[in-house]
Image: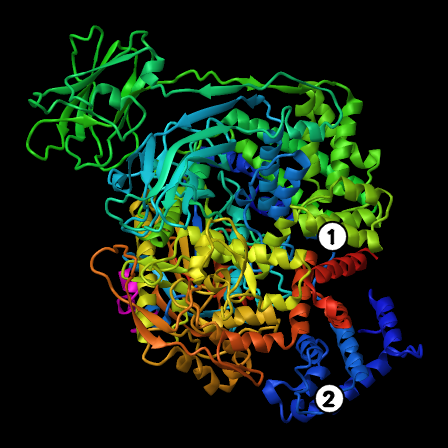
Amino acid sequence: MRAGMQHPRLGRIAILFAAVFPHGVVIADEQREEHAIKILEYYCFDCHDSATKKGELSLEDALAKEHFDGTLVFENLLAGKMPPADKEQPTAEEKDAVLNWLGKRREEALPKSFRRISRHEFVHSLNDLLGTSLDLASEIPEDRGTNDFDSDRRIKLSREMLTSYFSIADKMLEAAFPENGFPAEQQWVTSKIRDSHETYRIYHRPYKEGTLFSWTRANNGNSYSFFIDNFDPPVAGWYELTFDAAKVAKITNELSLQVHAGKYYYADDRPQPQRLVGVISVGDREVRSHTVRAFLRPGENVSVHCYSRHNFRSRNPQEGIYIKQMKARGPLLDSWPPTSYKMVFDGMPLRSGSRETLENTGFQTNLQQIGGKVTVSSFQEGMEKEKMQDGSNLTFWHTRFSPKVAKPPHFVVFENPRGAEIKGLSFATWTGGNGNGLVKSYDIYFSADGKSWGEKVMSGGLDVRLANEQPIIFPSETTSRFIKFLVTDSVQLDNKSIASVGKLDVITEIAEPVTISRVAVVSRSEKDLKRVIRRFAERAFSSKLSDEDLAPYFDAALTGLKESDFAQAAKLGLKAVLCSPRFLLAPGEHSNSSYAMAAELARSLWLSVPDEELLTLAASNELRGEVLRGEIARMLAEERSERMIRSFSDQWLNLRGLNKVTPSLKLYPLFDDLMNHYLPIETRRYLQHLIQENMSAGHLIDSDFTFLNQRLARHYGIPGVVGQEMRKVSLPAGSPRGGLMTMASVLKVTTDGFDTSPILRGAWISKNIVGTPLSPPPESVPALEPQHDHAETLKEQIEQHKKSKACYACHKSIDPYGFALENFDAVGEWRDTYKIKQAHRGTFQYRPKGYFKMGGSVDASGEINGDKFGNIFGLKKVLLADERKIAYNFAKKFFEYANGHEPDLVQRLHLWEFVGRKPENIRLKTLVTEVLEYSLSESKS
Amino acid sequence: MSPCDRRTFLKFGAALPLALQSLNARAATSSEAKAPPRRIIFICNSLGFYEPNFFPVKRGDLTTSRYLKELAVKEKMTVFQNLFHPGMDTSNHDSEKSFLTGIPSPEATNFVNSISLDQVLAREMGGDTRFPFLSFSIYDRGWGCSWNDRGVAIPPMHDERAIFDKLFGEEDLSAKRRQIENDQRIVKSLYRDMAQLKKSGGDQQKIDSYRTVIAEIEAQLAHEEFWLKAQKPKVPDSLSNDQEFVFSTKVSNLFELAKLAFQTDSTRVITVSLDWIYGAISVPGATGGWHTLSHHGGQAGVLEKLSRIEIDIVKHLNKFLSELDGIQENGGTLLDHTTVVIGSNFGDASNHTCDNLPTIVAGGGYRHQGHTVLKGATPLCNLYLELLHRHGVDAAGFGSSEGNMELLTG
């Protein structure tokens, strides 16, 4: 440290030193430096002087530099990695002297004054403040960049980010206090399904009153969607989807129904992504109701995938899931009047009518709604015109073919008795079958009397393969009394003129009887409005606020009061609060240290703002010591702490990249969406359990339990787990699972979906579990990614690193960790031999055995810092030998997650000492609590 | 206001409402015969190009490059050999952060970036279009080639549907107007909020940094308000739907959007950052992890797969350049009025080295050289400085530039 500069932590360091030197001797800076360098000279310079430079490190030269980053020396000394075990060791006091001196001299280049809140924190906070539950984080751009943690203080707010915060704040305020009221709750019941493609009928068949689904995996390996027909969410909101379903199979295992939401698969002429909103595990052979809740937007449909033991091509299946019907209900509100009003306008009288539930019984076509009728040229018995008007494309109208084939022309005539404005026709083929009769082209005619048809209005072609609605739009709207759809060409497999149609209806605007329920705050008083803004702002900012502080927000709302009603006026003031630097930049301005602490705790553990209890404690400035630790425990026990578990594990363990890796179905044919869905859940549930139950850090390495369901248990080869709910499962003796490293989530995210890379996996363990700082590869060293189909074994290829001194210096502490995981393939399944991908003929056709042959056998042995291991079991033992180090690394990571920067060396020293102080200090809840208490009280002092 | 005044004005008023410039420029140009505007696009292929396939084997002969021989507009392009960013011999994937800034050590923990070339140009050329600039990437990663004057990453747009809607989609103008008014009120109250914070002893640095962002929002709102008066251009939806090669489709759609944006004069400055370091991608002839393959270590089989990916990208570049060259504008083609800079942050991605950066300048109406091999390693920022001068920015230097070497003639 340069003379004359006041170091912000000098005060505390002096105290630390007082502890080191119990006689109360406080020695001067220069003496301390001299003392530390002497110790380093004595113990380290034998190898690390400028002449020997072992491991390319000359401490002698490094110490002479003004800006020497002592982190590596510090960490190695701290962890006892240096001096090596066979050399003379410094005494505890000497070690402390050096560590303290290194810690102090490290200059912090990073500005630590403030950080912006992340997009996840923004959305969670708004939900908690407004009483909404919207998941809009994905509509805000990712701004973490290449930093490990969202909280990183190097990330600065940009105009683009703030613009999107402005717009998300609007969206969420509108959802909480909609300008035009809340639409009525509606209920739909349907047993009809709609295929995504005309060939999909092979996946299901009519069964009892509904449909039996047997398998959904198609030729390209995708799971296909079957859409629930006649339900379109009228507005964005939460819906309850209840499936009445039963298992049709004599097996113990349960069958799964994946419920998806998204645009109709071939809408806009392209496959649309489907979002998984829930999984239903069907184990009962009696029909039972299963419910999932989903946030749906207009234009989205609900679809299902069935997942049975026949995930591919079971011919004439008699097994599967029987879906009798689906009942949809929504948009749902938790209560009436809605929570948002009750929370924000707490205690104020509200005026609200009742909110009705509208029953949508039975399906009506547009034609029926405008009082129209339909006639056809001819029909086959059982395939009458009603069959193309029943809202399903599984049933259809067919021209007569038996006993005698009807002669053309084949046509459909719509009658429009009230002269409604008709824009066109909506056509859909029927699915399944051999396609005989499907309409390929048509002409349209209008008529006033149904007799004289005049000139053709338009003609066009239709796609026979697609199952979705194909709109036929007239050149201009018509009010003609009669409209004719004349078939001019159709699929004729046996050269007979026939025609068939799955669905045909008119396109016209139907005035939807949307019932709106309104809520109003019964007040026009400025005083009330100010009170509302104050309550909201004090929670958002976690501080008592003066009238002066609040004036800008008051004014924003008060101007609104002149133009609109109370709630709409308040929205302006609330938005100003939500866009304020007091909310978006942390630490904020807090009226006492407890408020500051409350804000930090809520942000770290809930990704949100403090609740009433925290605010009450903060108001009387009681948040410290036992009370503080009690609050941390309470917050961890609350459901909202799952946000922290998810956020922390996503970032620390890099699980955010999980869905960016798509495993090859040629090599890993058993990989599927269902498995992928549960992979990160295992990791989250496990980590949550370790923290909640305050288990030791060693469990991060190994354990005799994990969290599994039927799908994951099958993947891991663990018998006896039935049903898809995740639960704690004891691992059988000899299982390689247990701990983070052998979870399929981690094993998948460290590959590219094809091959595994011991280098990447080694770096993952090294950085995230062991905590060795990595430096980028040196210059001019040929890079190397091993190839599995290479003549040399993978190991031989990587061992090339050993040949080069430059590589070996670092890779000796990276690659071996990765070797130990070689027994796990790119989706985390155990393997003894490598798979070598083989070509397939023509386009890829999915098959459960994949396309590969077996290659060389796996050698998972290695050596790390002199400790040899044979495989993952051995590596776990090696790592568990020093549990303190694992605990210390966890504490460092959690510190970085909570504070937005790595602990500096003084802080590391504190954490290291804490971990070693008592055996119970390696427990995870204890560590989380300590990190928060230490770092928060430090930043507040 | 004379152009010179305007430049001074710009220099001092980062937060100046851009709409003022728009009005100004419009008034000035409406009376004259309309000369086509100059545009510029920067494309960063973040995993580089395999050098032996990229640079011509025979000096000056583009047909002796396995990749460049695919390009149809050889007379309208120059490939530069021996460009680099001084201070960056080797780096990791963070090097893309410095591609358009030239600031060394992007991988360092205390790295602070500075304004990127496109953003300097956007200040000069961006005022007259609905979008002062556009920035694209393949996926949502929050950073790319564009960095603002505080060295903060500008999140690129990645969803081609959303970009198309932003550029050409219909919008409810009265709702948009109300939205702008609403936001302007909020901005006003935030200014008062910050004044109050300052008075009550809030962190000065924090308040100032926030004020800068708010000022930018204010300028943007004024700009948007001005553009409410003009209809968005209407273009048919020409985005590809090919699902077989998703990555390929994405790249080609981003180029298509760039072309449409230039053609409709929706913007004059674009950056595109191309990378995918996660799982495998499929292109005609190869499937594999692009990043994994980029670390080829010289192995022939790997190189063959990698080159399929690189050829696919070159194919899309070729289509983009050819289409720009096929669009006639007053006094030439769209390509003649668009400077296309194609490059990478890696010279050799396999070894993560950053010397001899593959660099192409195409179009722009220059008298092109085909293939220019520079004597000794030359800062890429020299070329950047020249691009600034050629687009009316009177800068003394940019990044690590040593001077304008006049590498482009005509």
User: Label 2 is found on which chain of the structure?
Assistant: A
As drawn, A921 above or below A188: below
List the residue tagged with mark 1. A633
Q: Quadrant of the C terminus of chain A?
A: bottom right
Nearer to the camera, A707 or B326: A707
Q: Residue at x 73, y 43 (%)?
A: A610
Nearer to the camera, B270 or A665: A665
Residue B59 among magenta residues = yes
- Can you give x and y, in whole percent of width and height, for residue A145 in the image? 56, 56
As drawn, A874 above or below B399: below
- Can you give x and y, in whole percent of width and height, for residue A91 in the image? 78, 86
Q: Amino acid at mark 1?
A: Ala
Q: Residue at x 65, y 67 (%)?
A: A697
Distance, label 1 to label 2, CA atoms, is: 40 Å
- Range of the magenta residues? B55-70
Give the SS element for disc 2: loop
The residue mark sitting in front, 1 or 2, is: 1
Nearer to the camera, A628 or B391: A628
> Which image quadrant for residue A225?
top left
- Can you give x and y, in whole percent of width and height, for residue A272 in the image? 37, 41
Q: Main secondary structure of the magenta part?
A: loop
Give the SS element for disc 1: helix
Q: Residue at x 33, y 54 (%)?
A: B316
Which of the two discs, 1 and 2, labels the residue nearer the N terminus? Answer: 2
- Can you give x and y, in whole percent of width and height, for residue A605 in the image? 68, 51
Residue B401 among magenta residues = no
Q: Amino acid at mark 2?
A: Gln
User: Label 1 is found on which chain of the structure?
Assistant: A
> Which image quadrant for residue A275?
top left
Question: Label 2 near label 1: C-beta < 8 Å?
Answer: no
Assess disc 1: are there few (<14), some (14-19) or many (≥20) residues with their C-alpha within 10 Å of its C-alpha.
some
List the residue tagged with mark 2. A89
